Image (cartoon, helix red, strand yellow):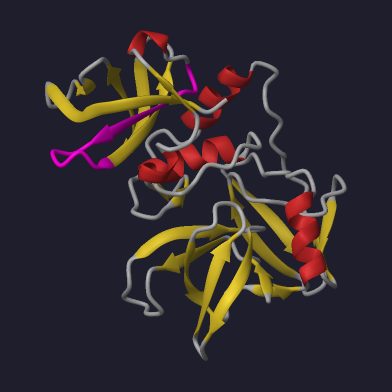
Amino acid sequence: MFGIAHLSLIPVRKEPNDRSEMVTQLLFGDAFQVLERTERWVQVRLSCDGYEGWIGSKQFQFVSEKTFDWINDQPKVFTDNLVSIVENQSKGDVIPVVFGSSLPFWDGKSFHIENETYHYDGIVFHPDANLRKSLVAAALSYLNAPYLWGGKSPFGIDCSGLVQMVYKIHGTFLMRDASQQADQGITLSFVEEAEPGDLAFFDNEEGHIIHVGMVLPEQQIIHASGKVRIDRLDHQGIYNEEIRGYSHQLRLLKRVL
């Protein structure tokens, strides 16, 4: 069985319990495979990154395997406004959707999910011809968004969610967790090699990757720590002017492009 998110933001939880931690979120248009069902919960595997978790049984729409395959195979179109409105013309419902939401089967004004027709007249995302410049501009759209564990929207996002979303709307699908993302791309040797859009990873005292951010021009970095913020990056790590010290220890740099 397969499904799609037809609401703005759906929490994906570690266990089938409302009190269980949120490990990630589904945005409108995200597709997934259904692994297991109970009366109140559905275990899903996200098609974009293979992440697994539990969502409420009333918070998604079933789709056929054919529709699921089409959604995954077709070029992706994403919303570009901080918040946009999608209208379910079949039911007359209005749905708020956040930056980076997917529009499956988009024809320029409307799209269909199974037998339901949706209308969207907002802006869709078009990357700049200069890809690195475009990545930076997209990341800055999240500036000052509050930190939220498992979050993926401008209203709450975590460090790996930030870089995953920025790359997602540019057609590159990263894994969900920072430790997984650290296995993607090509390793760089020095901070001086890094270009805007490259990723920097940071570890704890035990050597485990716990944080990620995206390199900006002039040896700066944008990352989610308390909020999405810009700090200085050097060979030691992230230097935070507010605390006049290093907040994160640099482990490695990766180039995904």
Q: Residue at x 12, y 23 (%)?
A: 245
Residue 196 is left or right of residue 7, and the answer is left
> Is residue 227 visible to the viewer in this orientation of the structure?
no
Q: Is residue 106 depicted above or below 211 in this figure?
A: below
Q: Is residue 236 depicted above or below 115 in this figure?
A: above
Q: Residue 136's x, y, as percent?
A: 51, 23
Please provide the residue range marked out in magenta.
196-209
Quick check: is 184 in the magenta stretch? no
Q: Residue at x 72, y 39 (%)?
A: 124
Q: Residue 46's x, y, as percent?
A: 57, 60
Extreme residue in the right direction? 107
User: Dividing the picture into quarters, in which one does residue 57 lie?
Assistant: bottom right
Residue 243 is left or right of residue 252, and the answer is left
In this orientation, which residue lies closer to the viewer: 195 or 141? 195
Residue 160 is left or right of residue 141, and the answer is left
The quadrant of the picture occupied by the N terminus is: bottom right
